Image (cartoon, helix red, strand yellow):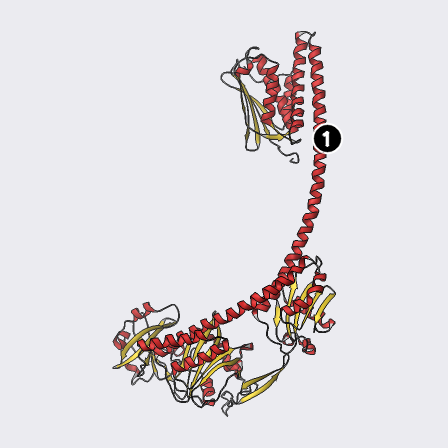
Amino acid sequence: MDLTSCDLEPIHIPGSIQPHGIMLISDPRSGQVVGCAGELADPSEILGRTLEELVGIDCQVVQDSLPGTGIQVLGELVFANSSWDAVAYASGAHIIVELTGKADGHTPDGAFLAELDALEAQLDRATSLLDLANEASRVFQRLTGYGRVMVYRFVDDEAGVVVGESIADNSPSFMRHHFPATDIPKQARDLYVRNKVRVIADVHYQPSPVVSASSDLQTIDMSDSTIRSVSPVHIQYLKNMGVAASASMSIVKDGILWGLVACHHHQPRPLPLNIRLACQNMASNLARVIKAREDSELYRERIALRAQEDRILRLVGEDRNLSQFFARTGRDLAELLNAHGFAVLQGDKLVQFGSCPPTDDIHAISDYVRAISSSQPVVTRQLSAKFPPAMAFKDKASGLIAVKMATDVPTVLMWFRAEVLQTIKWAGNPHKEGAKDPNTVLTPRASFDEWSEQVSGKSEDWNLAQIESAGRVVRSLHEARNNSRIRLLNSELSRSLNDNVSLMQQKDVLLREVNHRVQNSLSLVATFLRMQGRGASQEVKSSLEQAEHRLMAVSLAHRRLYQDDSVEIIDLSRYIGELVAELLATMNSEWGDHLHLDLAPVLIKTDDAVTVGLVVNELFTNLAKYAYDGRPGSATIKIEQIRSNLRVTISDSGKGISGPVNGTGFGTRMLSALVSNLKGSIEFEDNSPGTRAVVVAPIQSRGYEA
């Protein structure tokens, strides 16, 4: 068994308190006190009575005033004919009220508050973290009156070091002395974050146990208690230091225990509530100032590193090849992070600058990094602790920042720092196990005399700004590489598009020429038909006119294609409008006054447009012949798009049809074939009066669609 066993000690449920205070444990349902502790003449006279009877305050009122966590200050209460400072907090299903004595001369007044302001101003005036720690020690010594006050900061592996100190008696100095992590076990560190002020008024106290009819209260949680009894191991620790009274205030920065203000005194010394609250507030102020100082230093470091990064990364644009970039900038990249060496391993290709491990070891480190890391930097100041082979080259690479780069070839960037031999002053030998008395009770070390240790295998620590910079460099390189590849792909795509545009332009010119020639040829055939019909019989002449109109529909489509920008898509409304105009030019001029066109813009494939034109030609020609017995009359041609379908309606108000249309003539057969080619349907309906022909077909407005 060693002192690490202290990590298992349940210090939050000691079952007892320090006797300079009184604890009253009440059940909020009944308001009665069900447990108590402290120097009470007869605890049985306390149990079963209500808080209101004992201290003049209702338990429900106390419960309603409690915050979510921590204590609620109740102020001054009278108990057993004496005035006490009172606080309350919740513990499980119980409400606990704690009473501590009011010390003479500690009543808060205007002068006291003014003094607090002056002490806070002293913290703000500190120019560095070292000055701040020393100033804080003096401030807390002024507040508490303790003989020795130290500012204790947690460092590697939860060990701590004294970074500021003020001594008003003959206590020995612990300035810059280190204390091992076992001196403040993990559960104690966790409790310091929750309960930020702890006072041991007299290390020679005899614990006052909780008295209750229920055994459950022997393990009631006292995490928020201000008078909780302390671990016997810690009490012996303080006695071994020659300390009679102790107080500590937590320095919590961003929710993490940064350190402690540790106060020691050679005689017993309680701290009244107002001083404890002032210390807690001052510790919060100290944490704020520390954060501001550290953030300021970090900001300045970040600005300086950003300027160096920008200067280095400007060269990325000049070197399309990353290997060439690393060859040019490797030394600058090493200096960027104040590293002794820098190496990049791209597959099997190694580039290195400065003091680096042997080549085989760099390969091994790269394999280690790729095995444990995703994209976050691997950071250590003691590589051998994580990668034992590094002990062989600790003089070159005790410190490491390594970042993987997401490239086609496995790439790892590595910054190395050599070991820095350090002599650490410990307050006693940290490696000496705690002694055991004959009854095997664990006791802490007895000596706190300075004990020096030579530490090797560790480099200077990497700061947060340097770690961020390493990650930022890799991200910037990755982004630059991607941008370069995108530019290359865009260039290739642009060339390909230009080639395609040229081919499309040639195709359009060719198609327009073909359409022009087809239109001319069809016009020539139509002319021959008109010439042939001049001397023919009326029946032959009528057939030739129908053929001419059909040729006109096809010819007009090719003319439209020759004139339009697109050779595959046509606006059906414009095409049908021009087709009808051509038809009207060959008919009785009165038809122009009777025909109504309702043509909505519809984009359609050219081949389908020609087919629709032939359908309109057939239907309108038949309407002109039969609806009004060859005379002009009211007629409508309507084109519309209904969702993904084309709807063509040709209607009249003539004599109508007497039954289903089942003609067997060429015109009827051709009309049926044309509608079928459109994958559509045609219906002849009663228009009351007259006839309405409705053609519905799916629209295919892109040549590549099925």
Which quarter of the picture shows residue 657?
top right
Q: Nearer the viewer, residue 526 or 465?
A: 465
Q: Position of residue 183 (x, y in %)?
A: 50, 82
Q: Quadrant of the C terminus?
A: top right
Q: Nearer the viewer, residue 180 or 475?
A: 475
Which quarter of the picture shows residue 616?
top right
Q: Quadrant of the N terminus?
A: bottom right
Residue 6 in the figure: left or right of residue 706: left
Q: Position of residue 176 (x, y in %)?
A: 52, 83
Residue 291 in the figure: left or right of residue 72: right
Residue that numbered label 1 is attached to:
510
Say if residue 260 shows up in the picture: yes
Count numbered badges in the picture: 1
Q: Position of residue 184 (x, y in %)?
A: 49, 80
Q: Give the structural element (helix, strand or loop) at label 1.
A: helix
Q: Amino acid at mark 1?
A: Leu
